[in-house]
Amino acid sequence: MNGQRPRRGAKQSPSKGDLLQLYYYMRLTREFEESILKLYRQGKILGGAYTGNGNEATSVGSAFCLKKEDYLFPMHRDLGAHLVKGQSLRNLMLQHLARANSLTRGRDGTGHYADPSLRIYGNISHLAAMIPVAAGVALASKLRKEKAVVMTYIGDGGSNVGDFHESLAMCSVMRLPLVLIIENNQFAYSTPIAKQFIVKRLSDRAIGYGIPGITVDGTDVNEVYAACMRAVDHAREGEGPTLIESVTMRMHGHSAHDGAEYVPKNLLEEWKKKDPIARLEKHLTEKKILSASKKLEFEQKISVELEDAVQYALQNPYPAAEEAAVGVFAEQLGIKI
Amino acid sequence: MAVVTYIEAITKGLWEEMERDSSVFLLGEDIGEYGGAFKATKGFLNHFGSDRVIDTVLAESAILGAATGAALVGMKPVAEIQFADFVTSGFNQLVNNSATMHYRWNIPVPMVVRLPSGAGIHGGPFHSRNPEAWFFHQPGLKLVAPSTPYDAKGLIKSAIRDPNPVLYFEHKRLYRHIKGEVPEDDYTVEIGKGDIKREGNDISVVTYGATVHQALEAAELLEKEDGVSVEVLDLRSLMPLDKDLILDSVRKTGKLLIAHEDNITGGIGGEVAALVAEFAFENLDAPIKRIGAIDTPTPYSPTLEEFFLPNKNKIVAALRALAAF
Ligand SMILES: Cc1ncc(C[n+]2csc(CCOP(=O)(O)OP(=O)(O)O)c2C)c(N)n1
């Protein structure tokens, strides 16, 4: 823990039921991404396909701390956060397959959608560009006394973009209810972290803004959960933002086209031993929280729901071409939820 | 002469200029060991070393500002922006520092910014931009957009030797799809000079970048099927524009189609149209026509993107309308 400590304590460890939920969502996240990769290889997903393999404890464990009224601004490795916040597999699949009924009506792909009904606002490609927007939502929440917290993410590389720093400056001074999680996964595309920063921990950046900063083991969902719960509480109580660094490994290439030959093999092997899902599974099995039959039940549920989502999305057509011209300007105020 | 791809031509030009002038250096994200997202600088790090091929932090404003600073004191940086879209994260540096320094301080700023641009690759709204028009409006920046390997190599060399900031728009769709003969020896393509890629007498198409190839195909088709002779003028350089070449072509043909991939409104085509309307009005036999992307962000879904973008068929239709006028 660096800088100022969060003042409030919070429930710091997940219950047994929570742990099972966390496990389920982490498994679901990984399986979903495997089907994305399969669809990509089949030429059904156009452009790029990104996964968060290795990041499941972070994306799932963090979003798990949010309430319904809280806002989520996920990044490109955070499929798990979308799922935890309630996004359906069908909607996510429609997005990836750029279909007519997707949340962006085919105008954008992957997690680049907004779903106000769930208070999820996706990223754009420009790294860190959503952090100021998340700050703006935090500002609105504060001005309207909503007590809603905003959670968002950034990569180790992306944390060098000016928007990251400008947002922390604003949120710290205005004590805005923001939780900013740096997903330090050792690489930014091909660039190792040694070329991105020379501080020991990225959470040390918090010191410069006078806000709490904490580094957690991003392969341990319990640690992620504890830190995020505290940060969310801190924000909800009006104490301002927290910076969390979650340390893990990007186990896949930057995107599906990237073989990541630049990643040393032994590094991958080291991190494979710390796989967040295997780690949680071991813990849950040892503690007799997860039985073999429960595990099987989860696996079957995931497989059925995924198959449904894939088939559903594949059957949905692409948008009609002329639709491209529609929707640049709004006709009226307000959104339909 | 060797036949090389468009991206190989860029690589060759960069390599030769780095051999020729030790003040030239490269900076950008993932350009070293990885050789860049599109592999334009593969092998450069081993040959030129890490002082001349610099993997930077992920921060475009720092990259473009640092290029400006190094150029200010006499070095010749070539910055790579991973996708042209991300130049927006360093916009301020280019339009307020790089562009105005010579005017205010009388000091040259010899820097190049490489911008992999363009749509048609299912990149969606943030990996498809043609951002040239934003910079076209800013005095002090030169802009080039090659369409062939020959021009790509000649223009990167001219850009590096130019005493001004030059934005080099390289179209991603051309990288590996377009091949052409490129001389092994040292040659340059002058910035500010367009090129008649196909001569014709009935209609002029003024275009640049990837759209040049669509215009050439459309021109072939019109020749064959309609007996209409279409001239294709490749601007190559967007700032400065080769005004004489444009006006001469239109004075010859009397009809003008302007075609670019960037969206129509506020695009470079508008300036070309104004130029012709102002200085060659009496030579026009038909209203000026323009083709470009529709005025929306670049959509992701393939049906939408196809509707959004100009293509050969749309150019053919516009040419036929002009021919019939
Ligand atoms: C402003 C900006 N510059 C460059 C890129 C291109 N790009 C996309 S992801 C990426 C690496 C991101 O690394 P990091 O922030 O560490 O996140 P990770 O992908 O490792 O999770 C780069 C360079 C971008 N999307 N946005």
Image: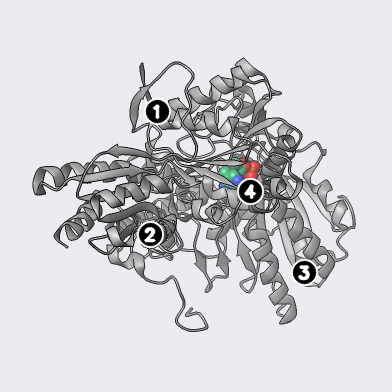
Chain letter for the residue marked with disc 3 in the picture: A
Q: Nearer the viewer, residue A275 or A44?
A: A44
Q: CA distance from mark 3 to mark 4?
A: 26 Å
Q: Residue at x 37, y 71 (%)?
A: A326
Q: What amino acid is labelled 2 in the image?
A: Ala
Q: Is residue B257 left or right of residue B150?
A: left
Q: Quadrant of residue A228?
A: bottom right
Mark 4 sits on what residue?
A57
**Which labelled disc corresponds to residue A176?**
3
**Which labelled disc corresponds to residue B273?**
2
Q: Is residue B102 left or right of residue B4?
A: right
The mark closer to the camera, 2 or 1, is 2
Chain letter for the residue marked with disc 2 in the picture: B
Q: Nearer the viewer, residue B237 or A116?
A: B237
Q: Residue at x 37, y 31 (%)?
A: B176
**Which labelled disc corresponds to residue B150?**
1
Q: Nearer the viewer, residue B178 or B319?
A: B319
